[in-house]
Amino acid sequence: MKVLITGVAGFIGSTLAKKLLDRSFIIIGIDNINDYYSVHLKKDRLSLLNSENFKFYKADLENTEAMRNIFESEKPDVVINLAAQAGVRYSLENPHAYIDSNIVGFMNILEACRHNKVKHLIYASSSSVYGANTSLPFSVHDNIDHPLSLYAATKKANELMAHTYSSLYNIPTTGLRFFTVYGPWGRPDMALFMFTKNIIEGKPIDVFNNGEMMRDFTFVDDIVESISRLIEKPAKSNPEWLGKKPDPGTSYAPYKIYNIGNNSPVRLMDFIEAIEEKTGKKAIKNFMPLQAGDVPATYANVEDLYNEIDFQPETNIKDGVGKFVDWYVDYYGVKL
């Protein structure tokens, strides 16, 4: 099977590509290697994908002609769209980047899937789409009409756009709402990376909402295992779907949404404590108020995911944080 992965130099994309290459899939990778964070880190991730079954294209999703040419040349069976402008807080600073990558870029992916008879489109959404919803755990059958950031709004837009193409063109689309993904090769702008770096270097860390935060931290290996199992389970229409009582998580069209989370929210202070325990160093905490666009708690209901693939994320924080710190120390050559 030939699988095209966008964002293949990214954290999740590179980890997924490595796993699928190990399972003898043919992988077509696309990434623009932008400088939102370390280009060196992205290139090092790509170096792990050295295989005769891997082919890489450097391109922007919003480049319509490039996307058309790649799809027409490669004819992938399955597309996994992980490329996006990420980050809730950065969307307050540079909103146009989110429209270009997450809306225009995704439009190009949908059109390319339509015209090249792609059998299954899997795409990254986000737990941020739940926005002002405080009904925990978050369910894919909940309403998500109140996003709190432009990033979240673009991810909800992706889900709506995918549904339109599933309905109009019968393209099976599967949206994945990731919950706070962490692990080795993670992004430098994410909490675990920044906390670990500063704790090791004896610098303060910013602790938002005065530490009164809970996150459903999900280890990257659990994320990619879930995606790999979903590849051969394209979305199907729900025969019980009713327009009088519409279910947001399924459809009359071949469209499905899944949460991928650990189903076990962790207090931010416990997360920091796990880093302290692993590094043997105490954090210098700079307590801050809740930031615009952030939510106090996330918690995934993963019942639909488990029922479909007989798997749900379960790596605990101590083990997951430990694996990240081990990678960080080795990759950057630091001493504890």
Image: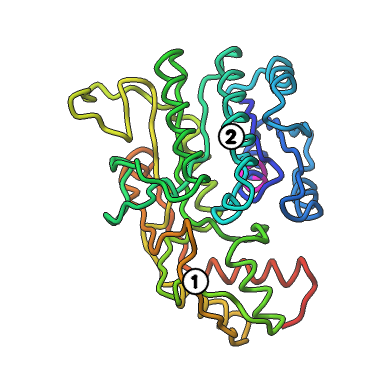
Q: Of helix, strand and loop, which mostly describes the magenta segment? A: helix
Q: Is residue 15 magenta?
A: yes
Count of numbered circles on the image: 2
Front-most of residues 12 and 191: 191
Counting from the top left corner in percent of width and height, residue 319 is at 52, 69
Label 1: element kind: helix
Counting from the top left corner in percent of width and height, residue 233 is at 44, 30
Label ID, residue 208:
1
Image quadrant assignment for residue 283 = bottom right
The amino acid type found where label 1 is placed reads: Phe
Badge 1 crowding class, 10 Å Cα cut-off, few under 14, some 14 to 19, many 20 or more, is some
In this rendering, the label closer to the viewer, 2 or 1: 1
Counting from the top left corner in percent of width and height, residue 312 is at 40, 51
Label ID, residue 81:
2
Which image quarter holds the N terminus? top right
Q: The magenta stretch spans which residues?
A: 14-18
Label 2: element kind: strand
Q: Is residue 289 above or below residue 221?
A: below
Of mark 2 and mark 1, the one earlier in the sequence is: 2
Between the residue at mark 2 and the residue at mark 1, the CA separation in whole angstroms equals 30 Å
- Residue at 52%, 77% (x, y): give it: 272
Which image quarter holds the C terminus? bottom right
- Residue at 51%, 45% (x, y): give it: 150
Q: Is residue 207 left or right of residue 31?
A: left
Q: Is residue 40 above or below residue 62?
A: below
The amino acid type found where label 2 is placed reads: Asn
**Residue occupying the far left of the picture:** 244
Counting from the top left corner in percent of width and height, residue 77 is at 59, 22
